[in-house]
Image: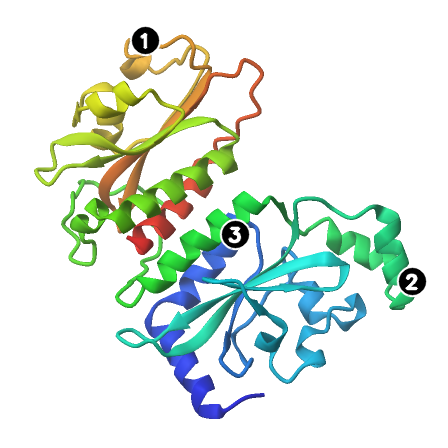
């Protein structure tokens, strides 16, 4: 399918820009299927069978997007920054253009989905469509349970974050995440990371999108992102939700001071619930209204540039602080900046 030159161009771009490595990570972090096609609809980075991928690759499940048109992109409608497609069973899929660095020419498209938007259909509706389309309902039900359900806000945040990453990925060099912490901590030493990008309006927008996504993932209502200053000595708040404006304006934390400063100094995450056994932080807990919290360094290629703080004041909170997931998501953040 499609022109061979466009296919080769798209394949070379995703290889050079590291998407072969980052897309599987995004799939595992977001639990949403992602693949890449060239401008003619030819697959250059395949889908997998997780998180709804089988709906695209198994004819028995009935979507058949690759068979119903010569170009899968023709199934999508322009929605501004993104393109959207509503498939059989009311699944939603999204496309984000991938452009050549230094050019406005679209070389490929990220395809995100399928996902269930807001609510599942009643079971009898799935059953009726399956019967009409001669689809095995038991197979459909099995795959349906693997498909992520998201709100309008969540999918917008995910798409915004991926879109910012796509636009700023020309010089991205993804390194495999080490299983051990680095012996020494580097602050802003990596030439690929431009700290000044954080100070821009776009940087603020990306930080706020990341924070919103982190709050959604962890089911918490309060949080902030603190960024190191250019002297690499002091943390200030650059994005916040659910925090008093006076705290935001006056917060200044030096490396080694407070839990955030200690997280930077030791490159350690602190998950705090009830009375922590860690003597390093017990004396620093002075806000009894906070029931659970997470303080986690933000890094780019083992270079620390800030701290993520999340907390909840709910007594019966269902907060889930998956540090590995948030660390992987922070790689997406640093790539977008």
Could you say whether the residue bearing mark 3 is in a helix, strand or loop? helix
Relative to 197, 318 lies left or right = right
* Residue at image coords 42%, 14%: 290
How many neighbours does mark 3 have within 10 angstroms: few (below 14), some (14-19), or many (20 or more)?
Answer: some
Q: Earlier in the sequence, mark 1 or mark 2?
A: 2
Residue 28: mark: 3
Is residue 313 toward the left or the right of residue 125 in the image?
Answer: left
Q: Give whichever of 182, 80 is nearer the camera.
A: 80
Residue 324 drawn at (x, y percent): 44, 41
Residue 266 at x, y percent in the picture: 23, 30
Q: Kindly indicate whether the residue at mark 1 contacts the one at mark 3 (C-beta within 8 angstroms).
A: no
Q: Which residue of the protein is positioned furthest toward the left in this rendering?
A: 231
The part of the image, by quadrant, that contains residue 273 is top left
Q: Which residue is mark 1?
A: 286
Which residue has dot 2 on it?
131
State the residue at coordinates (88%, 55%). 127
Q: Which color mode does the image show?
A: rainbow
The N terminus - image quarter: bottom right
The secondary structure type at the circle numbered 2 is: helix
Task: Report x, y in % for residue 278.
Answer: 34, 16
Q: Nearer the viewer, residue 230 or 245?
A: 245
Rendered residue at 40%/14% (across/down): 276
Quadrant housing residue 57: bottom right
Mark count: 3
Give the side of residue 153 with respect to residue 210, left or right.
Answer: right
Mark 3 or mark 2, earlier in chain: 3
What whole-number distance in Å separates the C-alpha atoms at marks 1 and 2? 60 Å
In the image, residue 253 sits, relative to residue 32, either above or below, namely above
Label 3 vs 1, first from the N-terminus? 3
Pair 1/2: label in front: 2
Q: CA distance from mark 3 to mark 1?
A: 36 Å
């Amino acid at each position: 399918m499609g022109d061979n030159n466009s296919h080769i161009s798209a394949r070379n771009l995703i290889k050079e820009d590291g998407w072969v490595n980052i897309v599987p990570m995004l799939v595992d972090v977001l639990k949403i299927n992602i693949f890449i096609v060239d401008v003619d609809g030819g697959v250059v980075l395949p889908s997998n069978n997780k998180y709804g991928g089988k709906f695209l690759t198994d004819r028995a499940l009935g979507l058949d997007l690759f068979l119903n048109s010569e170009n899968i992109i023709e199934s999508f409608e322009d929605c501004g920054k993104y393109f959207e497609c509503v498939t059989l069973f009311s699944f939603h899929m999204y496309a984000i253009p991938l452009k050549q660095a230094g050019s406005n020419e679209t070389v490929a498209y990220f395809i995100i989905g399928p996902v269930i938007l807001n609510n599942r259909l009643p079971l009898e509706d799935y059953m009726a469509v399956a019967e009409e389309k001669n689809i095995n309902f038991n197979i459909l039900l099995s795959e349906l349970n693997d498909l992520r359900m998201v709100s309008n806000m969540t999918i917008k945040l995910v798409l915004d974050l991926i879109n910012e990453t796509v636009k700023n990925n020309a010089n991205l060099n993804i390194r495999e995440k080490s299983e051990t912490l680095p012996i020494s901590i580097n602050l802003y030493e990596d030439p690929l990371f431009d700290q000044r990008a954080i100070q821009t309006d776009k940087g603020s927008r990306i930080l706020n999108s990341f924070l919103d996504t982190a709050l959604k993932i962890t089911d918490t209502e309060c949080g902030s992102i603190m960024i190191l200053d250019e002297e690499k000595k002091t943390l200030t708040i650059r994005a916040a939700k659910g925090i008093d404006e006076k705290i935001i304006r006056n917060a200044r934390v030096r490396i080694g001071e407070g839990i955030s400063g200690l997280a930077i100094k030791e490159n350690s995450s602190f998950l705090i619930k009830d009375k922590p056994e860690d003597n390093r932080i017990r004396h620093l807990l002075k806000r009894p209204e906070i029931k659970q919290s997470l303080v986690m360094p933000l890094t780019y290629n083992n270079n620390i540039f800030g701290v993520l703080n999340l907390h909840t004041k709910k007594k019966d909170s269902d907060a889930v602080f998956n540090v590995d997931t948030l660390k992987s998501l922070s790689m997406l953040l640093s790539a977008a900046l």
